[in-house]
Image (cartoon, rainbow, N blue to C red):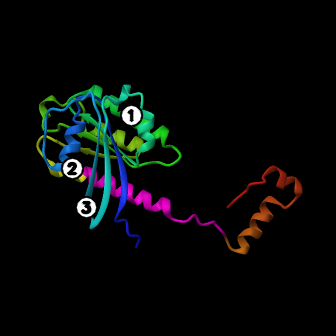
Amino acid sequence: MTNLSGSRLKVLVLGARGVGKSAVTVRYLTRRYIGEYNSSSEFLYKQTVNFDNLTTQVEILDTSRCEEHCCLQEHIEWADAYVVVYSVCDRTTFEAARRLLETVSLSKEARRSPAILLGNKRDLERGRQVAVDDGHETSLRFRCQFYEVSAAENYVGVSLAFQSLMREARAAQQLRTLPVRRKTGPPALSKMIGMVFGRSSSYRKKRPSLSI
C-alpha cells in the first residue's frame, strides 16, 4: 500500500459574503467557533492534520467575496479540492454556490477535482430558505459531496465534511501517481478488429489513430 504520510493538499474555501467560510475553516482547524471575521480579506492556513492513521500537510485558502475576486481563476487552478459554502438561510448565497461549482467544474474539466457543497447555519432552522433536497440535487448535478452543518454549534459535522473531502482528494492524488498502462488485448481480438475494419491502405488513412 502506498504511504501517503507527508502528502500535501491545497483546499480552496469559496462562497458568498457572510455564509461562514472563515467560521467553518477555523472550526475545523481549531475546534473553536468565532462569529466575527473580516469578510473583505482572505487568509491562508497551513497545518498538519492526522486522520485515518495518516499525516497530511494541509493548506486551506479562505477567500474573500470571491465571485467578484479578480484572482478567482488563479485560486481554482491552485487548489486540489474545494469547499463551496452557502447559508441555508439565504437563497441568494445558494445560487452563488451553484455558480461557483459550475466555474470550478468548467475550469477542472480535464481532471475533475473533489469538491463539497456545504450548507452552513443549519441551527437557524426558522429562517431556512434552502431545502435539504436542493442541496442534494445540486451535488448530484456537479458530482460532489454534500453536507449541512452548523459551525456555531457543532465541531463534529464540520470535521466530518472536511475529512471526507480530503480523503477523496488524497485518493485522487494517489490515482494520478499510478503509471499509465497501455490497454492490450489477446491476438484473437486484434484479428477480429482487422476483420471488421479491414487492413487496406485507404482505411489506415481515414483512421490513423485508432486505439483499443
Residue at left offset 83%, top offset 60%: 198
Q: Residue 29: which numbered mark, if any?
A: 2
Residue at left offset 25%, top offset 61%: 50
Residue at left offset 28%, top offset 31%: 41
Picture quadrant of residue 164: bottom left
Q: Nearer the viewer, residue 27 or 158?
A: 27
Picture quadrant of residue 96: top left
Q: What are the residue bounds of the magenta stretch?
A: 161-184
- Residue at disc 2, secondary structure: helix
Q: Is residue 7 above or below residue 87?
A: below
Q: Is residue 140 above or below residue 73?
A: below
Q: Are marks 1 and 2 in contact (CB under 8 Å)?
A: no
Residue lying farthest right?
A: 201
Per the image, is 165 magenta? Answer: yes
The reply, left or right, for residue 134 in relation to residue 152 is right
Q: Is residue 99 above or below residue 54?
A: above
Mark 2: amino acid? Leu
Q: Nearer the viewer, residue 60 or 156?
A: 60
Per the image, is 104 magenta? Answer: no
